[in-house]
Image: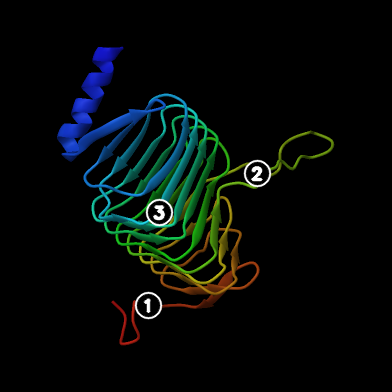
Amino acid sequence: MADASHTVLKWISDQYRWHLAGRCSGVWYFVTKPFRIKRRILGKRNVILNQASKIARLAVRIRGDDNVVEAAAQARLGRVVVDVRGNGNRILIDGEAFLERASFYIVGDHCSIVIGRRTYVAGGVFVAAESNTNISLGDSCMLANDVVIRTGDSHGIFDRTSRARLNPGADVRIGTKVWLAHRVTVLKGVTIPDGCIVGTGAIVTKTLDAPHAVYGGHPARKLRDNVAWGWGLEGCD
């Protein structure tokens, strides 16, 4: 067992060129520089990989085995919470992403939450609420305050006669260059195509059918086709 652990650690160190900082409660920490992190870990073979350029505050709570939390090169994190309860899960914050007041919750096994490169999150909640469900957020997206993305309802709804479950969890996929405005909610099984804008307070309950379109309302419906958005006011990218 000691030899196997040594092999895994050496492979990670060689690939990422990070340095082993220490081991606590069965978790290995790899860091390139000092960072502010609070952790409460119960389990085995849980790994935190950090190459972020800045972490202002990060709280990690894990209960389970074989989970991975990774912040890639040049990611910036401020007031981020990670709470994982299960086994074999993965959270990836890709390079140059900027997250402020974001929360990640996983309840179950073999789930993943992936935040794309150069994506900006101003205050979002990401919930993988059931085993084997995933959230993927593409590159260059923008999420405003109080956005919620969920892969499940956290409670079962059943047919009284057949006892069949009526609300199984499902993956959420959000494309490249998507803008989710203030208080948007994205529910289980939804796909949002590239270049879409979802307006303030919208609830997205089913897959949106067209890319580069504006959606809004409860539930979200298409309001306009053939649009593009930019980070500033002087034109689209």
Dots 1, 2 in contact, CB < 8 A? no
Q: Which residue is mark 2?
A: 154
* Badge 3 amino acid: Arg
| Label 3 crowd (10 A; few <14 / some 14-19 / many >=20) | some
Q: Which residue is mark 3?
A: 57
Q: Label 1 to label 2, Cα distance in Å?
A: 34 Å
Left/right placement of residue 62 relative to residue 55 reads right
Label 1 residue SS: loop
Q: Position of residue 144 (x, y in %)?
A: 47, 69
Dots 3, 2 in contact, CB < 8 A? no
Query: Which of the labelled discs sits on residue 64, or is there none?
Result: none
User: Along the polypeptide, which appears first: circle 3 or circle 1?
Assistant: 3
Q: Position of residue 132 (x, y in %)?
A: 51, 36
Q: Residue at x 78, y 33 (%)?
A: 163
Q: Which residue is mark 1?
A: 229
User: Along the polypeptide, which appears first: circle 3 or circle 2?
Assistant: 3
Q: Position of residue 21 (x, y in %)?
A: 26, 35
| Label 1 crowd (10 A; few <14 / some 14-19 / many >=20) | some
Q: Is residue 25 above or below residue 149?
A: above
Viewer-side residue, 74 vs 150: 74
Q: Residue at x 53, y 71 (%)?
A: 182
